[in-house]
Image (spheres, rainbow, N blue to C red):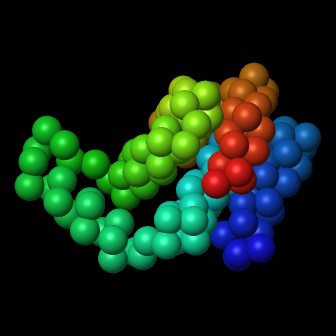
Amino acid sequence: MSELQNKSEINYESARYLHDRGNYPSVAHCAYYSCYQLLRHIWLYSLMKSETDLNFIINKHKGNKAQIKGSHETLINEIQKYIKENNYDDFRVINKSIGQLRKLRISADYEDNSFLYNDSLKAIELSKRIRPILKKY
């Protein structure tokens, strides 16, 4: 098990622990990063790519204002392409769910709003749907 896989497990368990204790905004952060760390694991160990490879793709898009993407969005898109080539059904689940989870994390971390029980539960459910698929790759 890579350290990224281990961190993913810890973050997932932390999300569940925080939810059970009513610390709802922190749940989305942990649930999202439990998936993001698996995406990074796939990039580094399954695809055998480097941080330099990822930065090259990110920087390539910086010249095109219509395609400016951050490191998270770029990594998500690259892994989605890989999954789509291997299993379209897995791609559909990831494509739909990871964006929803990312929006919940942004809402919980950055927006001046309430983040309540149902939001927290949704973050855990999305993570629970995404993680087993990512673990296959």
Which residue is at 37% across, 58% downward? 71
Q: On screen, 30 above or below 50? A: above
Q: On screen, 21 above or below 62? A: above
Which residue occupies the extreme top position in the image?
118
Give the quarter of the figure containing the C terminus.
Answer: bottom right
Residue 10 percent coordinates (x, y): 80, 62
Which residue is at 42% across, 75% downward? 50
- Residue 89 shown left or right of residue 56 in the figure: right
Residue 13 percent coordinates (x, y): 85, 54
- Residue 123 shown left or right of residue 85 in the figure: right
Give the quarter of the figure containing the N terminus.
Answer: bottom right
Q: Nearer the viewer, residue 85 or 76?
A: 85
> Residue 34 sits in which quadrant?
bottom right
Q: On screen, 74 above or below 104? A: below
Residue 26 percent coordinates (x, y): 70, 47
Does the image show residue 122?
A: yes
- Residue 18 shown left or right of residue 38 in the figure: right
Which residue is at 71% across, 53% downward? 135
- Residue 87 shown left or right of residue 65 in the figure: right
> Residue 62 sits in which quadrant?
bottom left
> Residue 21 sits in which quadrant?
top right
Q: Nearer the viewer, residue 70 or 104?
A: 70
Q: On screen, 32 above or below 128? A: below
The number of numbered discs placed on residues in the rendered structure image is: 0
Does the image show residue 107?
A: no
Residue 130 percent coordinates (x, y): 68, 39
